[in-house]
Image (tube, rainbow, N blue to C red):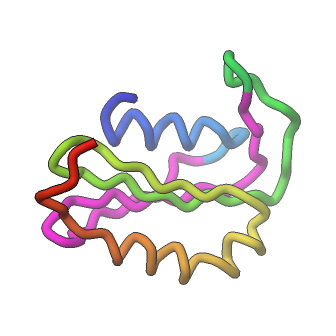
């Protein structure tokens, strides 16, 4: 939960002594999209208290937070830097494919 900025800060805190995540903002299908990148030693948070499950050096995160009409929508991919690099184009394609839907109600 929280704002886009709070989520970006939380994602950045999942990396040990990492600089603030790199962020950009773009518009896709008329919606504001916050793009996020972070890298370094991933703390692998998990469990109810989101405690580190062990440090994983050489990891990278790419993410997107969409300001959709009914609230924020999150896309996040974290893994070894080489794996993320190999799949970044597909992730970008996923984000670029989002559309507004006037009929979907969940």
Is 39 above or below relative to 94?
Answer: above
Q: Residue at x 34, y 57 (%)?
A: 34
Dominant SS of magenta comes to strand
The percent coordinates of residue 14 (x first, y second) are: 65, 38
Q: Residue 75 appears at what percent x and percent y?
A: 47, 56
Give whichever of 91, 20 is nearer the camera. 91
Asked if residue 32 is among those painted magenta in the image, a careful observer would answer: yes
Q: Which residue: 72% across, 33% down?
A: 45
Horizontal and vertical percent for residue 84? 68, 70
Residue 55 in the magenta stretch? The answer is no
The N terminus: image quadrant: top left
Point out the residue furthest to the top here.
49
How many marks overall?
0
In the image, the segment drawn in magenta is 19-46
Identify which residue is drawn at 44% across, 80% down. 93
Q: Is residue 44 left or right of residue 64?
A: right
Q: Quadrant of the C terminus?
A: top left
Q: Which residue is depicted at the point 19% across and 64% down?
A: 100
Residue 88 appears left or right of 72: right
Q: Position of residue 35 (x, y in %)?
A: 40, 61
Which image quarter: residue 4?
A: top left
């Amino acid at each position: 939960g929280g704002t886009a900025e709070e989520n970006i800060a939380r994602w950045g805190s999942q990396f040990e002594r990492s600089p603030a995540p790199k962020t950009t903002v773009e518009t896709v299908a008329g919606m504001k999209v916050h793009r996020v990148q972070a890298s370094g030693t991933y703390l692998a948070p998990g469990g109810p208290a989101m405690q580190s499950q062990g440090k994983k050096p050489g990891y990278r995160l790419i993410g997107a937070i969409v300001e959709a009409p009914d609230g924020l929508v999150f896309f996040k991919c974290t893994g070894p830097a080489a794996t993320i690099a190999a799949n970044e184009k597909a992730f970008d394609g996923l984000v670029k494919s989002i559309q507004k839907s006037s009929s979907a109600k969940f």
